[in-house]
Image (spheres, rainbow, N blue to C red):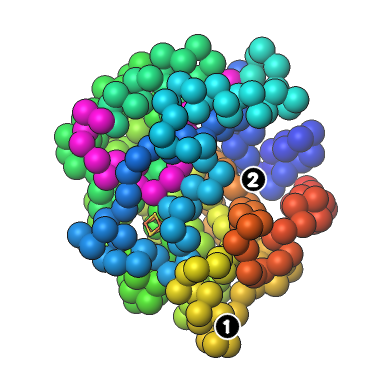
Amino acid sequence: MWETWFGIEMRYYSANDYYKDRFGCKMYKAAISLPVTCPNRDGSKGVGGCAFCSGEGSGEFASLCNISVVNQIDLAIDKLKTKTDEGTGFIAYFQSFTNTYCEVGFLEDAISQAVNHPRVRAISIATRPDCISDKMIKMLSRINKICPIFVELGLQTSNDEIAYRFNRCFFTQEYDDTIIQLKEEGINVITHVIFGLEGDTIEGMLDTVNHVVECKSDGIKFTCLFVLKGTRYEELYNEGKLSVLEMQEYFDIVDKALELLPKDMVVHRLTGDGPKSSLIAPMWTWNKRNVVNYINKRFK
Ligand code: SF4
């Protein structure tokens, strides 16, 4: 499928086009941090977190969690003011750590504050599939009827053995069960996958994409593996036991993955950019302009 992205014909259904189709305007994300942690860090499922995750809970770009939700949204909107205008919509993005790893009432209150913000048109919640109780899903379903909710599930790989190596601490079956429940409630699901995990193969990465397709995820986010300071992957990388994907190698896999997606699956991200302050490798992800140029040339 060929769609437009910044006026360029693209080979996939991009988030930009999807948002325009659904909301009639360009949408930006306003990142929000809540004072929550992760079961993979506090000992209830694991300790030390996933091998690639820094202590910031993958939310380095989020504002500080001791500021109110409304103020965090205002700050994010203010930061984006040169790129946006009155017609731009915002998605309140609960980004860091595991945002459903808390009392239902606590998250409901935080989401309600975001829903009532005049510029917010949708809510996005990053979490793990093993941390969404039935009660949590019912609450999200209620709010979804007033304001669209996207739930972003960090699967990373469908291979439990690869997942064990990076200490994911949940089974792929839990993802399979949760996505069914969320979709039964009409909640839009975006699945995160990582290419380049320790021990994974190209075949394995594409198996993961096929798995996400079979589970009927509404959207997908691709990223290459980042090695960040202070993570277990940093140790492996320094010991020469972990290598990272070069840019062309990574996008060769993305290219193959795009071929596997149904036309209506939204690609929310082709790759991410690691936090500059803690990125060790791969350094090509640092040069965002170069990456965007490469994507435009290759995928248009
Ligand atoms: S589940 Fe998420 S927040 Fe928790 S350790 Fe893994 S990547 Fe980090």
User: Residue sitting at 57 percent across and 26 percent down?
Assistant: 75
Q: State the residue at coordinates (19%, 42%).
A: 133
Residue 228 numbered tag: none
User: Which image quarter has ligand 1?
Assistant: bottom left
Amino acid type at circle 1 is: Asn
Whether residue 176 is visible to the viewer of this picture, yes or no, is: no
Residue 74 percent coordinates (x, y): 55, 22
* x and y percentages locating residue 241 in the rendered image: 53, 86
Q: Is mark 1 within 8 Å of ligand 1?
A: no
In the picture, measured across the screen, residue 249 lies left or right of residue 133, that is right
> Distance of mark 2 from mark 1, alpha carbons?
36 Å
Residue 188: x and y, percent?
40, 35
Q: Which residues are magenta?
A: 89-106
Looking at the picture, does residue 26 appear above or below residue 193? above
Residue 98, image x, y percentages:
34, 47
List the residue tagged with mark 1: 238
- Dividing the picture into quadrants, the one containing residue 273 is bottom right
Question: Is residue 215 covered in magenta?
Answer: no
What's under tag 2, amino acid-wise?
A: Tyr
Q: Residues within 10 Å of mark 1 (few under 14, many from 20)?
A: few
Residue farthest toward the left in the current orientation of the protein: 135
> Which image quarter: residue 8?
top right
Task: Tell me if residue 113 comes above or below residue 6 in the rendering.
Answer: above
* Numbered tag placed on residue 12 in the rendering: 2
Q: Is residue 295 left or right of residue 97?
A: right
Taking depth in this image into account, of 179 and 11 the one nearest to the observer is 179
Q: Residue at x 26, y 66 (%)?
A: 46
Mark 2, Cα crowd under 10 Å, few <14 / some 14-19 / many 20+, is many
Which tag, 2 or 1, sits closer to the chain's start? 2
Q: Is residue 111 visible?
A: yes
Question: Looking at the rendering, in which quadrant would you find the N terminus?
Answer: top right
Q: Secondary structure at mark 1?
A: helix
